[in-house]
Amino acid sequence: MPIPHVTLHSLTLRALITLALLLPPALPARAQLQEPDSSADEAGEAAYLADLPVVLSATRLQQARADTPGSVMVIDRHMIRASGARNVHELFMLVPGFQVGLHTGNQPLVTYHGLSDEAPRRMLVQVDGRSVYSPYFIAGVEWNHLGVDIDDIERIEVFRGSNSAAYGSNAFLGVANIITRAPSETRGGSLRYRAGSGGVNDVSVRLGKRLGDVDLRITAARNHDRGLSAINDWRKSELATLRADWAINHDHVLEFQAGWTNNDQGTGKDGNPTDPERTARIANTFGLLRWRHAPAPDEELSVTWYHQEENGRDRFALSVPIPPRQSGLPVTIGLPFDFDYGFRTVRDDLEIQRITSPAPNLRAVFGAGMREDRLDAPLRFNSDERVRHGVNRAFGTLEWRASPDWLFNVGFMAEDNSLTGTSLAPRASANYHMTENQTLRLAINRSYRSPTAFEQKSSMIFSTSAPVVTPLMTIPAGTPISQTFRPSPGLRAERITTYEMGYLAELRPIQASIDARLFLERARDLIEMRLENSTVGLIPRNNTRYFANSGEADIRGFEVLATWRPATGTWLSLHHTELRVDGPGDPATASGAQPSGWVANSAPRHSSGLFGAWEFHPRWQVSVARRWVGGMSWYADAEHRIRMYRQLDLQLSHRLPPELLRGEVALTARNIDGDDETFAPRASWWGRQVFATLQLEF
Amino acid sequence: MGLVLRLLLLLVLALGSSWALAGQACLMMSEEGSAFGEAAEALGAELRSAGHRLQTLPSPLRSEDSATLNSCALVITLGARAAQSIAALAPRSLVLHTLLPRSAYERLPQRAEDARRVSAVFIDQPAPRQIELLRIALPEWSRVALLVGRESLELGQRLQSAARERRLRPTLAQLSEESELYPTLQRALAEPSILLATPDSTVYNNRTISNILLTAYHQRSPVVGFSPAYVKAGALLALYSTPAQVGQQAGEAARQGLATGALPPPAAPRHFRVSTNPYVARSLGIVLDDPSVLRERLERAEGNP
């Protein structure tokens, strides 16, 4: 009888063992859960007592619009995306007072309040504090070499009006500060592909990661398009950037940026004897190192150094036919030339800046910096010697909150420029907060633009590359034939004095704002390109160019921008600008290349814009941008005046359902209401472009 | 005779010292640090004013200290680690845990009979007080975003219901791993909301704080923190009690315990502070009252003088 009992017992035991074998994976886990938290710090008081790094330091914070010493428009990430812009320069069409045109598809023209030609050079653009104002030639901002992918931009702060006191010479008519996203915000991966009409074929990839205390972001992109129709202006631009922010400890951050851009582009015109269709290449590399010590929200010390190098390659050999009329010979002869527009420029810039709050109602920013540009461009300077251009600077700004109603801002920039000597750019403004929502601003400032090395030292003399036998003589190789630019020693900095009255209403209950600016900008000593007779070379010219401080302009008008933004993805903004640019009545000299009144044509009298986006359904957004641009001339005279034109952009975008994929698809149609001449009559047409974009995040 | 007298004297001294020990409070700190020192100082000052002595116990406790522990009438712990080691020893004396969050206190092993002997003064603020501050400081804001991990889910739910009671519109998003942080934040702050930070090291830590503050700032959303470090880092405001405030309240509870033999029930800190970051406020276009005004209004709302 005991046997069954034993059997039963062993069965029970076996069952228990089997159960035990099944259970172990679950049991310890449960046991762990029931245990008190092993690490007291995890759930303890540490979080309440621990220190944290200063994340929103003074330079990261956007100054309240009601406190700025001028009108600032902010283009944020959502607006950039809704605009459908592939390139940063296109965004300035959204800003009142700006003119944006296309010389060719790969040569954008952007200026504020006119005073421009085919190489606008009177505004400044900075990317995270790195100036992208070209140190070579006369081209101002290098829009193709900003070294930033448009999707890495957090916001662009556009300061409308001159501001040398804060940003030095070159901040002559306006300043745009491009602020890229912190790498801590772009962790993970992102892939973008865009294709459409006109050869649009863009691809980009971004990877963000945190390694220890370092936040990293790597972006690589390649954009391609065929440019405008009927001209050789295709573009393939490549970009690779790296940003690494190392939080050394709570107070110290080291930021490192490096980048490379390469632009292969079509240039020249079919049938032009000295400017044939060809491919040019410009490559750019940069590195930036910034150490930032921010022990408190309004206390910051930073040291920034950046280095950039640019290499241009544009070389072609040609035999240029010289008709008897020019040479005085009985027959047309062909002169061989080796056109080498190649160049190399190097820029180094070092700056130290301190932000401090000496009293609760006072805030000060001051610092000093030095910059040196070194240029090798033998054809442009007719010399194999390196051209050096240095600027040392000291600056300071004091913001005094005198009372809840009144805020005063005074600032200065002193510069010592190796080309033009010293200058002092002061600024003063008073902001009166009439009510909690309304601010009235009065500001006055003096700003400068120093001539570029090219403007002062250019000497372009074309010489033969091989001996030529003519019926009368033999022209040996290296004989100077013609001079197109001659040096302009003694060129001074241009100066501008701005008087402005601003009004800002921020009506928060209805989520609307109105920003108006009434201004008088008096520009003097404007550098103009002039023509003269030249006897340098075998073939005399009557149109050798040089530069002189002969221009002046009085710009007056007003801008108004009204925005209603009830939600992050829904807004409507309207802007209108009235401008009058007056120049001297008579040409300064009889041989003036820029005839009297050129400044008057340099900006449209009236221009308006509308920009809206509507998130009509969760994750679905439609956006529209419409522009009306009055007649103007980029080419300094009435003959090249383009007529008023309109442009319309539309975009439909859909944020993918996150359970399926993270990302966005968009269909964009730009300038769909017909082709426009935005540069000069019969030169080029800005046509429509339709493309689709797929962006995936992982 | 001399010997007898000497023995008597020794006896009296021994008895005297044990009587003195009977009224003595012992303190165990989780670690040496300025915050703990500040709390201990406030606590000691409060006890000394009532004539009590405070003896510091080493942490971790050595075996030879167990006798000292047994002779304490009241054991006070500062911080969660000290609370855990004392709770594990389960002394027969009164025990007052302080400078620890309520959640850490609730996780301590407790026996039914402890209820009368064991109490606490927490470091964290009660949910209704946090929500009331949002109403007072940011009356135009109704959206409140809460981002919680597994640890802080319960706290998040308490805040959520407190917010609902106050007719705010709270949204609660739970994270299971750090990689979800950015997309979750983007969703939670798709429309500008107050981001009310909760102490959960899986969500809010040194690695994530820059991401959180920047994302919130770019979404035009103010962050409300639970320590002055948050305000320094870039939060709009923070509500917290200083270690000294917590220490003083613990001292008062300890005095009561020593005098009556019973501790007051576990309580949140009575006194608190509000810090604001005027630069962030201005940049976000938010008009904020002075921190002292906010504190007074919050005290009045709670019915405190």
Image (spheres, grey):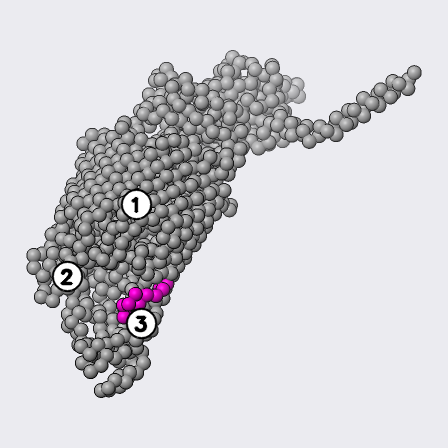
| Alpha carbon distance from label 2 to label 3 | 27 Å
Label pair 2/3, CB-CB below 8 angstroms: no
| Front: mark 2 or 1 | 1
Output the chain of dot 1: A
Above or below, comparing residue A176 to residue B33 in the picture: below
Q: Which residue is mark 1?
A: A672
The answer to which of marks 2 and 1 sits earlier in the sequence is 2
**Residue A51 x %, y %:** 44, 37
Q: Amino acid at mark 1?
A: Ile
Residue A670 in view here = yes
- Residue at 51 percent of width and 21 percent of height: B120
**In the structure shown, which secondary structural element does the residue marked by tag 3 occupy?**
strand
- Residue at 25 percent of width and 50 percent of height: A676
* Mark 3 Cα shell of 10 Å, populated few (<14), some (14-19), many (≥20): some
Tell me where residue A36 sits by quadrant: top right
Q: Residue furthest top?
A: B260
Is label 2 on the same chain as label 3?
Answer: yes
Q: Which residue is mark 3?
A: A339
- Residue at 29 percent of width and 37 percent of height: A612
Tell me where residue A535 sits by quadrant: bottom left
**Residue B185 x %, y %:** 44, 34
Above or below, comparing residue A109 to residue B108 in the picture: below
Bounds of the magenta segment: A270-282
